[in-house]
Image (cartoon, grey):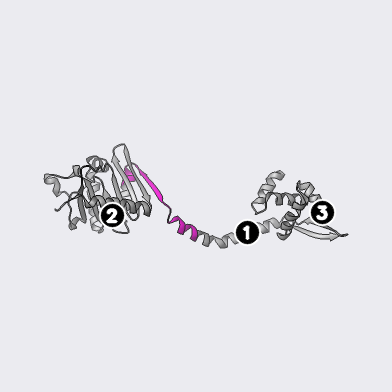
């Protein structure tokens, strides 16, 4: 390891680069005056004094006066290990407080999770069943035929039944084009009543809802059930959640109610 590499290593202990240079010069010279150390370290003499004072404070050099001349002597480099151990102990003592600060600040940061493929879509839907609020909003066509073919109607019906058993309520805002007719109105997936813990409204025809958007637990999830383009992107952000809830409720207020 050359001197520049050693100097760089010493900076990890909190030494400035020039302070590390002064220490290396002192090591090489043994006992020397500030002028000699400054010359060896290629530093101005007045500047070298400041670095030597810091090294003395840290216990890396000792100062003595002989014949009226002040000289500096480098102490055993083993002291560097003691300094490193002391810094490690201080860091370990501060670590719990640092973790508390990190935890409190990270709770306000947006978090993004991406689910891909069929397994990912199902994993995301299972996470809704763990909803802390026991309530969610969803925009889009939950009856999308392609989604049912991809995920499987059997899974959707089973998931819906488990949702009801867990007491998870929701508002479902759907495109007018997905409004059921005839016997389809009797399906578990199209009913809008307290028994199935679902209230449905159909958005005006001018409002397009090509994907599913779930809103729950300060999360906004964007879900595509298209074959070859399966994904669920979940953004956890209170600001985004609140903004989309406001948009949802504004559309909800002008949408067609369902009674069945």
- The quarter in which the N terminus is drawn is top right
Q: Are marks 3 and 1 in contact (CB under 8 Å)?
A: no
- Residue range highlighted in magenta: 100-121
Looking at the rendered image, the disc whose residue lies closer to the viewer, 3 or 1, is 3
Residue 94 is left or right of residue 109, and the answer is right
**Which of the pair 180/35 is nearer the observer?**
35
Task: State the separation of the CA atoms marked 3 and 1.
Answer: 30 Å
- x, y (%) of residue 71? 82, 56
Residue 164 is left or right of residue 85, and the answer is left
Q: Are marks 2 and 1 in contact (CB under 8 Å)?
A: no
Which residue is denoted by mark 3 in the rendering?
33
Task: State the separation of the CA atoms marked 2 and 1.
Answer: 49 Å
Residue at 49% from the left image edge and 59% from the top image edge: 101
Please tell me which of labels 2 and 3 falls first in the chain.
3
Which residue is denoted by mark 1 in the rendering?
87
Q: Is residue 29 visible?
A: no
- Element carrying mark 2: strand
- Element carrying mark 1: helix
Residue 20 is left or right of residue 250, and the answer is right
Residue at 66% from the left image edge and 51% from the top image edge: 11
Mark sitting on residue 136: 2
- x, y (%) of residue 49? 76, 55
Residue at 76% from the left image edge and 47% from the top image edge: 41
């Amino acid at each position: 390891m050359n001197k520049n590499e050693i100097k760089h290593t010493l900076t990890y202990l909190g030494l400035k680069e020039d302070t590390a240079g002064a220490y290396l010069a002192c090591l090489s010279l043994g006992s020397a005056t500030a002028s000699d150390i400054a010359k060896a370290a290629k530093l101005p003499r007045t500047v070298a004094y400041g670095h030597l004072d810091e090294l003395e404070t840290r216990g890396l050099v000792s100062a003595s006066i002989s014949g009226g001349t002040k000289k500096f002597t480098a102490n055993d480099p083993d002291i560097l290990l003691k300094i490193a151990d002391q810094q490690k102990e201080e860091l370990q003592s501060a670590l719990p407080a640092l973790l508390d600060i990190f935890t409190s600040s990270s709770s306000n940061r947006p978090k993004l999770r991406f689910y891909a493929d069929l397994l990912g879509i199902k994993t995301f839907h299972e996470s809704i069943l763990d909803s802390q609020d026991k309530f969610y909003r969803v925009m889009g066509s939950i009856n999308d035929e392609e989604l049912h073919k991809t995920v499987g109607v059997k899974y959707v019906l089973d998931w819906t039944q488990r949702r009801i058993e867990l007491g998870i309520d929701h508002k479902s805002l759907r495109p007018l084009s997905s409004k059921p007719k005839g016997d389809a109105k009797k399906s578990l997936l199209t009913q809008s009543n307290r028994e199935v813990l679902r209230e449905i409204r159909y958005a005006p025809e001018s409002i397009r809802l090509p994907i599913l958007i779930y809103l729950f637990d300060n999360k906004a999830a964007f879900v595509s059930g298209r074959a070859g383009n399966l994904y669920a992107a979940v953004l956890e952000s209170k600001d985004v959640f609140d903004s989309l809830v406001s948009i949802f409720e504004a559309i909800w207020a002008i949408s067609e109610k369902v009674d069945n």
